[in-house]
Image (tube, rainbow, N blue to C red):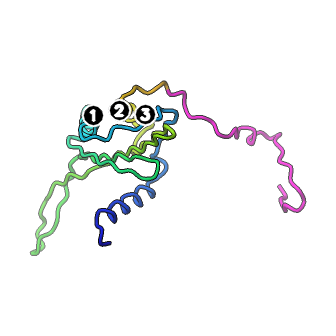
Amino acid sequence: IRHRRIFDNATLFEQTDRLSSRYWRKRPRLPQRQPLVTTEAVRSLEAALRDYYVGREGRGRHCHVDVYTRGDGIYYYGFLEDYPKLGGTFDDQGQYQPKISKDNFEVIFRFNPLAGDLEVYVKGKAKIAAQLQEIFARVCLETDLPTDNGPTKTYELNPLMRRSFTFPTEPGDAIRS
């Protein structure tokens, strides 16, 4: 607690670990190399994210990226200005005071240079994640992404859906059907 920066970083990673897996999208088989983490590279990533979001969604006019290392991963946290929201507060006399707030939304890149795996956390469609991965690869890995042939299958589960599928069990398994 006395080391504020360490405590803040631990809190950031704890919050990252609790993000919904629904919005993490992984891209394996990228070049196994250290990504650029220089100030110039970070500024280029900020500019590329800004251009992407302003051009497509009209938000993200301001962008800030922080870089952290954790284990084998290098994390790039992008904070972009979201759409303005009209809200307000009440003053001490109970009078409503309208206020426009400009919150941010985040895009997180996690790259493992040993494995060549790139993950991106972004709320939205898979197409957006793929386009952001291309931006990251171009700016921070100085490469174009190879054609993505879709996710690799780890298990073939389709046979389980066939009525003819049988799963042998022993009486001691206590499985009736």
| Marking on residue 135 | 2
User: Magenta residues: mostly which secondary structure?
Assistant: loop
The boundaries of the magenta stretch are 148-177
Q: Position of residue 134 (x, y in %)?
A: 39, 31
How far separated are the C-alphas under marks 2 and 1? Answer: 7 Å
Q: Secondary structure at mark 1?
A: helix
How far separated are the C-alphas under marks 1 and 3? Answer: 14 Å
Q: Position of residue 96 (x, y in %)?
A: 13, 66
Badge 1: how crowded within 10 Å, few (<14), some, or many (20+)?
some
Judged by depth in the image, the label closer to the viewer, 1 or 3, is: 1
Name the residue tied to disc 3: 130
Precedes in sequence: disc 2 or disc 1: 1
Does the rendering let one see residue 146?
Answer: yes
Q: Amino acid at mark 2?
A: Ile
Badge 2: how crowded within 10 Å, few (<14), some, or many (20+)?
many
Q: Secondary structure at mark 2?
A: helix
Q: Quadrant of the N terminus?
A: bottom left
Is label 2 in contact with label 3 (beta carbons under 8 Å)? no
Q: Amino acid at mark 3?
A: Ala
Q: Secondary structure at mark 3?
A: helix
Q: Position of residue 168 (x, y in %)?
A: 86, 49
| Marking on residue 102 | none
Does the rendering let one see residue 57?
Answer: no
Q: Amino acid at mark 1?
A: Ala
Name the residue tied to disc 1: 48
